Amino acid sequence: MTSNADIARALQELADLLVLAEGSKQAFRVRAYEKAVAAVQGMPREAAGLTAGELERVPGIGKSTAAKIREYVDTGAIARVTELRKRFPPEMMELTRIPGLGPKTVVMLRDRLGVTSVEQLKQAIADDALQGLPGLGAKSQQKIATAIERLGLHGKDRRTPIAEAMGIATLVVEALAALDSVTHVQFCGSLRRFRETIADIDIVAAGNSPHDVMRNFIDMALVDEVIGRGDTKTSVLTGAGLQIDVRVVKPSQFGAAILYFTGSKQHNIELRQRSIDRGQLLNEYGLQETEGGKIVASRTEAAIYKALDLDYIPPELREGIGEIEAAAEHRLPDLVDVGDLRGDLHVHSTWSGDGRSSLDDMVAAAAASGLQYIAITEHGEDLAINGLSRDQIAAERREFERLRLENPDLTILSGSELNIGRDGTVDYDPDFLESFDWCVASVHTHFDLSEAEQTARLLEAVENPAVSAIGHLTGRRIGHRPGIELNAQAVLEAAADTGTALEINGHLHRLDVPSDLLLQARGVAGLRFVISTDSHHTSEFANLEWGVHNARRGWVERTSVINTLPLDQFLDFVERKRH
Ligand code: DGT
Ligand code: CA
Ligand code: ZN
């Protein structure tokens, strides 16, 4: 049956295409489909099993969306999407990712200059052709050029944000895992290593009926074009132009295959060299003796690492940056695990303007997921529309009282997500700030300041005793908005000195602090992290897992993550900074 995730992905594509067709992200139809995406993602039942009439009764799903969902489930495609894809091909959709380039401008560039791809836009900028077009001056031409560079949106380097790739890979893995002939299946490559952008998706399945696997794969609704077909490897493109390779291997070779295709290339080269030095050969079929060819290990990755006298190296570490030496000397980091986390310290509800689940539902979901403590951190009053006044906070705290009685096993902390102003000051006054148990402070405005200004602003917030943590440090949206310019080293050191935690935000669109900065932070003694979901909907508590993968990629150790601590020790951390 078509899964809710698959339906949500199809509706999201429709919404994205309609932004161009309607010329605005705020268009009624766009908003309607985006609401429906959230509704389908949050449904406790399979949407595919419902009639159009039943779908319409789901809050957030209207009549025409219900019809589209049925169309997708019944035919595997939405005719409107197919038609819009012709008008707005994937290369043109790419243009909408560039900050400062609204949908009307994208369409205008096509109509006036014939520009329908990032490459063509770069050429137009080089020719100075944007000057004088409606709403575009010399300055915006330069801004767009910089944004293209920083997002890496060009040529064959075109990479897909992890949020998009993860959704698609999960659909394929689930579909293949459901086949009787498949014993194991795993997505590999950069996605398994949890890189923030992905060039193509590499999937390995084990089983004795490759033909059956490939037939089911290319029948999937998300497959737009088959570009190579065989029983060991089949490659396809999705409607958005993302390549997926599926390989089928024998169950006895599965470990060797996923090890090879997970990479990275550099990690593979170093592993292979190590095996050669030890009189063995490593390839995608197994580890074998050079003399005689006896297979030493092939079924699992763990067996192969063991045979090479290495501790098991988790995928997130396989970048060829010293992990093999560390594994040989038994000094791999003691990485944080999702099971270690006891609390989530960044949670919104519909009390925030952008929250999508009620406070009661958020608390119930947190309790059900086994968390011991949470901080409800609605937006501070300075954030237009979404923020809470003091009166609203007082009113919400009365709700906390009731919810605490109803949920004796969950500690509900009163928190806030403060806004770091242009000058580094935050919402409310010091006395009122003291009434919170925990405050995370984040940048939500002024993304364009200079490095010096951004750094000064962040340092000011770090010095504030009421600020327990800095939220999503760089403010980036992967593939959509670059992070702020920042002297990260200065901020990391100040955070360590003041006892301010750095949030590792688990939203797949954010993964912020980025893992390259986490690697840099290894050199800063005493720095502490908090892995948070930034949930706006009950389904987003799952972000904890993504935050953990990102932390592991940055070699973050268990002992430096404060929400692994029992509640009293966690609160001690907050208190130490305040007094
Ligand atoms: P990307 O660019 O996001 O697709 O990154 P990867 O790491 O997924 O790279 P990809 O898809 O080209 O290849 C998947 C894995 O296959 C890679 O991580 C390691 C392995 N691989 C690919 N080419 C080579 C190679 O030339 N030598 C070795 N040893 N391994 C390779
Ligand atoms: Ca890949
Ligand atoms: Zn937030």
Image (tube, rainbow, N blue to C red):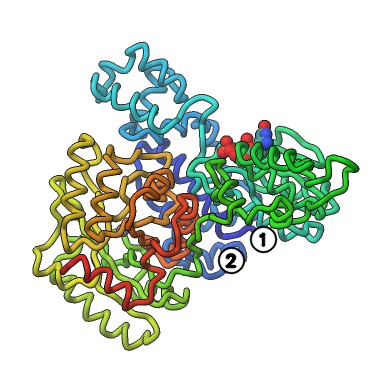
State the quadrant of the C terminus.
Answer: bottom left
Q: Say which of 24 and 507 sits in front.
A: 507
The answer to whether residue 305 of the structure is visible from this angle is yes
Query: Measuring 47% from the left and 29% from the top, which residue is drawn there?
Result: 92
For residue 356, which quarter of the picture?
Answer: bottom left
For residue 468, which quarter of the picture?
Answer: bottom left
Quadrant where ligand 3 appears: bottom left
The answer to the question of whether label 1 and label 2 lie on touching residues, with beta carbons closer than 8 A, is: yes
Between the residue at mark 1 and the residue at mark 2, the CA separation in whole angstroms equals 8 Å
Q: Residues within 10 Å of mark 2 (few under 14, many from 20)?
A: some
For residue 543, which quarter of the picture?
Answer: bottom left
Q: Residue extending furthest top? A: 127
Find out if the beta carbon at label 1 lies less than 8 Å from the nearest ligand 2 atom.
no
- In this rendering, the answer to whether 110 lies above or below 62 is above
Question: Which residue is denoted by mark 1 in the rendering?
Answer: 1
Question: Which residue is denoted by mark 2 in the rendering?
Answer: 46
Q: Say which of 439 and 270 sits in front.
A: 270
The answer to whether residue 243 of the structure is visible from this angle is no
Residue 530 is left or right of residue 10, and the answer is left
User: Disc 2 marks which amino acid?
Assistant: Glu
Where does the image place residue 519, in percent across and percent down from the top left?
42, 46
Q: Say which of 309 and 71 sits in front.
A: 309
Q: How many marks?
A: 2
Q: Say which of 213 and 53 sits in front.
A: 213
Q: Residues within 10 Å of mark 1 (few under 14, many from 20)?
A: few
